[in-house]
Image (cartoon, rainbow, N blue to C red):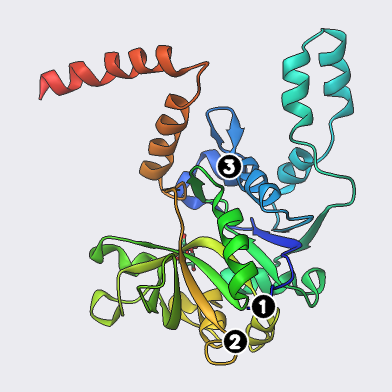
């Protein structure tokens, strides 16, 4: 098999209103909500960097300017930390800095769906393979999910979408794949439907928020076809590419947290806190002191 070119760019759709987290998201972009002390967007950026991404394209909207400040260098803050000899905090801060010129912004001027958000970045993407990372989906695992996908893509090319099985009654919340099985982690996709009813779902194999796409997907998005929920769906544009180029579902190795829902976000917060060596013991005791009396009272 010929080796495919690498994936140089990633698109981060961050224009969503985050209504499920109101009132917090009235002035704080949901992507800046922290898991312990790192905002959701930082996990997405770290994952992209681990996968070799060099250009970071954020699709923003009105009310999201705090994200631009977060992604900027902070010379005053670092000078203050340096003066106070806070070297580990300074290192932590500098670890979040993006290489100069590596970040670009596109604006989604109307909330018309995920496909529309990606299409808004078309001029910045150009004619190269690109990744899409949805920061709501936080994926923890031994190898960052996008890195696993880039490695698979280097062998298979085409389009690769992250996939995992979900409970059958949850298919209406996801893009659902009709995919072949039995080829290890990769399965050729024969069809995909955005948020089907359980009767119309071809399987319970769901797309989660990591994609590696051929730029031809942008041409399909240019049709501006409206799909599920009256929105322009990325799923539909990828589905239109089936038969023209290959589309694969990739069953990644890792745990996915749906940080777009309150329960998923809280679960991620607890899991990430318990994984932190500096917090684990205290937090475990803390958690037990909250949970045990409640269980006893039931
Ligand atoms: C989006 C995609 C959907 C995918 C999901 C993963 O939906 O449209 O295909 O399965 O992300 O999180 P959303 O959650 O934005 O409604």
Give the labeled residue for mark 1.
214
CA separation in Å, label 1 and label 2? 8 Å
Residue 290 relative to residue 8: left or right:
left
Q: Are marks 3 and 2 in contact (CB under 8 Å)?
A: no
Which residue reaches farthest front? Answer: 1
Please, what secondary structure does the residue beneath circle 1 have? loop
Which label sits on residue 291?
none
Point 58% across, 42% down: residue: 40
Mark 3 neighbour class, 10 Å CA radius: few under 14, some 14 to 19, many 20 or more = many
- The reply to whether residue 110 is in sight is no
Mark 3: secondary structure: helix
Estimate how packed mark 2 is, as few (under 14), some (14 to 19) or many (20 or more) residues with alpha carbons within 10 Å.
few
Mark sitting on residue 245: 2
Residue at left offset 16%, top offset 23%: 295
Could you tell me if residue 188 is visible in this image?
A: yes
Q: Which mark is residue 40?
A: 3
Mark sitting earlier along the chain (1/3): 3
Nearer mark to the viewer, of 3 and 2: 2
Percent of width and height locating residue 117: 65, 68
Instruction: Quadrant for the N terminus, please.
Output: bottom right
Mark 1 and mark 2 lie on one chain; the one further toward the N terminus is 1
**Which of the two labelled residues, at mark 3 and mark 2, occupies the earlier sequence position?**
3
Q: Residue 66 placed where, x, y %?
A: 72, 42
Q: Is residue 267 left or right of residue 120?
A: left
Q: Nearer the viewer, mark 1 or mark 3?
A: 1
Q: Tell me whether circle 1 and circle 2 mark residues in contact (CB < 8 Å).
A: yes
- Tell me the quarter of the image containing the C terminus: top left
In this view, 275 is above or below 293: below
Asked where in the image residue 291 lies, by quadrant, the reply is top left
Residue 134 at x, y = what percent? 57, 57
């Amino acid at each position: 098999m010929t080796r495919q070119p690498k994936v140089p760019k990633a698109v981060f759709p961050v224009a969503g209103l985050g209504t499920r987290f109101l009132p917090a998201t009235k002035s704080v972009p949901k992507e800046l909500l922290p898991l312990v002390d790192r905002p959701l967007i930082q996990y997405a950026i770290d994952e992209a960097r681990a996968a070799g991404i060099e250009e970071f394209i954020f699709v923003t909207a009105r009310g999201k300017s705090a994200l631009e400040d977060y992604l900027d260098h902070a010379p005053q803050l670092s000078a203050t930390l340096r003066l106070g000899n806070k070297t580990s905090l300074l290192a932590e801060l500098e670890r979040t800095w993006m290489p100069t010129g590596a970040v670009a912004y596109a604006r989604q001027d109307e909330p018309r769906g995920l496909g529309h958000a990606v299409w808004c970045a078309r001029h910045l993407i150009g004619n190269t393979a690109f990744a899409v990372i949805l920061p709501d989906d936080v994926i923890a695992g031994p190898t960052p999910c996008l890195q696993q996908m880039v490695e698979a893509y280097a062998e298979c090319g085409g389009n690769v979408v992250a996939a995992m099985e979900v409970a059958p009654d949850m298919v209406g919340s996801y893009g659902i794949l009709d995919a072949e099985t039995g080829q290890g982690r990769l399965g050729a996709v024969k069809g995909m439907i955005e948020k089907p009813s359980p009767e119309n779902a071809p399987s319970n194999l769901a797309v989660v928020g990591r994609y590696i796409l051929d730029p031809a997907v942008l041409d399909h998005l240019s049709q501006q076809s409206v799909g599920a929920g009256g929105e322009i769906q990325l799923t539909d544009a990828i589905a239109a590419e089936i038969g023209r180029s290959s589309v694969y579902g990739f069953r990644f190795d890792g745990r996915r947290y749906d940080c777009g829902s309150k329960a998923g976000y809280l679960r991620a917060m607890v899991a990430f806190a318990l994984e932190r060596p500096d917090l684990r013991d205290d937090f475990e005791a803390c958690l037990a002191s909250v949970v045990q009396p409640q269980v006893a009272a039931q």
